[in-house]
Structure formats: structure tokens, C-alpha cells
Amino acid sequence: MLNNAQFQNQSALLFGRRNEIAALTTALRGRKSCLVVGPKGIGKTRLIDESLSISQQPFVTVESPQVLHRLLVKLAERLSCPTGRIGSLREATSISLNYSVVEALRKAPQCVILENVTDTDPRMYRFLQQLYYVPGVCLIVTSKSRGCLGHLHKLLWDPREEIALKPLTRTEALGLFEAASNMYGLQSCDLDEFRAKVLSAAQGNPGQIVTMCRLACRPEYQSGRNIMFVPLRIDAFAAFV
């Protein structure tokens, strides 16, 4: 269960995403496949979490699938596929796992969430193509861009299936900064200079704004009412994806 701070953190990251939440929620409820693209920290995971919470659809999630066999094992485990005579899904062949996963989803269709997908090869493309056409199953894929998908771009080619997360507007970013600074107890600090630096460095990236506020609340980055933390190279942080 999320505590209050975690819940506020999730909500804060969704500033300016009302249309995107509505679009993804509609796709989930209609079991329509969708590609969510945007740079690290832009809020792809938060968008999916919120949309799943609203739509109340059954789902399985796999993070950064790189090799088909590992993806099949993870899906088979999450779908509670039978192990058969082998006794361990990890020791099963890709062919048997492919069959088990597809059959499990045919019997109980749900949403398959694949996050941070890059450079898919032909074998993974052919497997995901099977899932794409299983009635009641939808693929929700996140990636930096369509060009990063590898062979999967041939499946998720339709612009109508894409949600592109853009940087927040200046007003949205300012609203997020105020919410995040309150969340992390920065109200007693002198925020004028820090606010300007954060908004300039983040360039509308919500994950970076929240990360900088989270770091600034640490005692080692404060001197009296001054925040000593310099918001540089926040793109290197992977706290929010």
C-alpha cells in the first residue's frame, strides 16, 4: 500500500497529463494496444500506473525485455503457467513457453505491459505479433521513441496507437515544482533562485523536477534557508522513468 507521500509523489508526476491518461485508460478498457514514448523521466510509468488504477484491467508487467526466452519465462511465471514434466519454467524451451503463454492469455485475456523496450529482434517481434492478435489481449509498450523499438516498430506502426509524452509547459512545470517542494518540506527554504535553476535545468521533464526537489530536502544540501544543491546533469538519475 502506498503511504501518503508516495501517493502524492505519483499524483505530482501527472501534472499536465489529463488527455494522455484519458487516452490510455480508454485503450486499456477497450483492450487496444498502445505505444507510449518519451525520454527518461517524462512520466511513462506513472501514466501507466494511473491509467491501470482507473481502468481496473488485469495486467502483467515485464521491465526492459531484451531476450525472448527471458521474456517468455517472466510472462509464464506471472501468468502461473503449468510447469509440466519439466518442473521449472526456467528450464523449459522457448517453444513450449511460447505455447503456454499464448494459451494462458487466450483463456484469460489481459493487458501485457512491456516497459523500456529497445532493439527487439525478429524472434521477439514474431512472438509479440501473436499476442497482438489474441482477442482481448492488448500490448502496452513504453520506449524512448518509435525508432528505438527495433523490429517491433513494424507491429506498432500506427500513429493512432501512440501516446507521445511531451515536456510540461512552463505553467505545468511551475505547478509541479510547487507541489514537489511542499511534498519534500522545502517551504522554509529560500526557493526563488533554486526554483529558477530547477525549471531551467529540467526543461519540462517532470521526473527531473521531482528528483531535484527530493535531493534538495537532504540536510547536506541545505545551509540555513539556502539550498546548496546545484541542479546539474539530473538526466543521469534513473529514479523516474
Image (tube, rainbow, N blue to C red):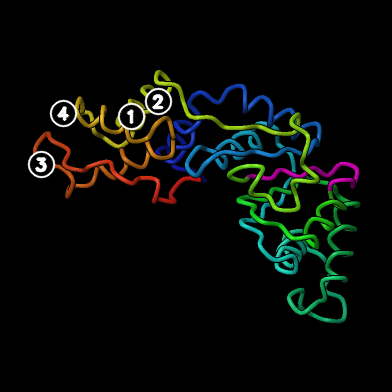
Query: Pointer 2: what residue?
Result: 173
Cα–Cα span, label 3 and label 2: 26 Å
Numbered label attached to residue 223: 3
On screen, 68 above or below 133? below
| Residue stretch in magenta | 132-142
Cα–Cα span, label 2 and label 4: 19 Å
Q: Position of residue 48 (x, y in %)?
A: 62, 39
Cα–Cα span, label 3 and label 4: 10 Å
SS under mark 4 = loop
Cα–Cα span, label 1 and label 3: 21 Å
Q: Nearer the viewer, mark 2 or mark 4?
A: 2
Query: Pointer 1: what residue?
Result: 199
Q: Is residue 181 left or right of residue 68?
A: left
Disc 3 + disc 2, Cβ < 8 Å:
no
Query: Pointer 4: what residue?
Result: 190
Q: Position of residue 107 (x, y in %)?
A: 90, 52
Q: Nearer the viewer, mark 4 or mark 1?
A: 1
Residue at left offset 44%, top offset 51%: 238
